[in-house]
Each structure stands twice: as C-alpha cells, then as structure tokens.
Amino acid sequence: MPISRISLYHEQRTSVPGYLLVSEATVVSPRHGGYPNVPGIYSDYQVVAWKDVTGAVHRKRADIYPQLWDLGRAAYPASLNHLDYPLL
C-alpha cells in the first residue's frame, strides 16, 4: 500500500520529461504474495492509492510502470498460511 512518502519519492526521481520509472516490486494478488508489508495492486483500495503515485509522476510528464511481483517459492510459508493460501 503506497503512502504519501512514496508519491514524493517517485516524483523526485522523475524530474526529466519522458523518463520511465519502474516502481518497486508490487504483488499482483494476496495468493502470490508471501512477505508482510509489501505493496500490492490487487484491491480497489490499493489502486486508488497508486493513483496518487502515478499522478505525481505524470505531473512531471514522465511515465511509470509497476514491477509486478509473484513470490512463488521465495514466499514465507507462515505469511501465506495466515491467509489460508498454499505455497505455490
């Protein structure tokens, strides 16, 4: 879940129009996560929060692309078990 500091962080790194910024690793679904407290983009709430980040980047006339993340075997099984998801 991005916070206001993340918008500022990305905005500060996109001071050149046309710049392409690749965001930090972003989990595509809770089933494909497995680490606590990492950004995601699978819920309506998260999408709205990411709009603040993308808006900050676009105001600088730059582009942003999410680094989509699926942890697979690297996930912490305990984090997945807490959500009743199997380790994929």
Image (tube, rainbow, N blue to C red):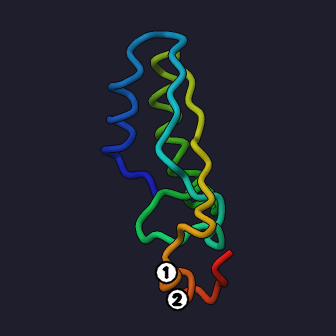
Q: Which residue is mark 1?
A: 79
| Alpha carbons under labels 1 and 2: distance apart | 5 Å
In terms of image quadrants, where is residue 18? top right
| Position in image of residue 34 (x %, y %) | 53, 72
The C terminus sits in image quarter: bottom right
- Looking at the image, residue 22 lies above or below residue 41: above
| Position in image of residue 22 (x %, y %) | 52, 33
Foreground of the two, 10 or 79: 79
| Position in image of residue 7 (x %, y %) | 39, 39
Q: Which residue is mark 2?
A: 82
Residue found at x 53% / y 82%? 77
- Looking at the image, residue 72 lies above or below residue 41: below
- Determine contact: label 1, label 2, CB under 8 Å: yes
Give the crowd class for mark 1: few <14, some 14-19, many >=20 residues within 10 Å. some
| Position in image of residue 10 (x %, y %) | 39, 33
Give the crowd class for mark 2: few <14, some 14-19, many >=20 residues within 10 Å. few
Residue found at x 65% / y 84%? 85
Tag 1 secondary structure = helix
Residue found at x 48% / y 57%? 39
Indicate the amino acid at tag 2: His
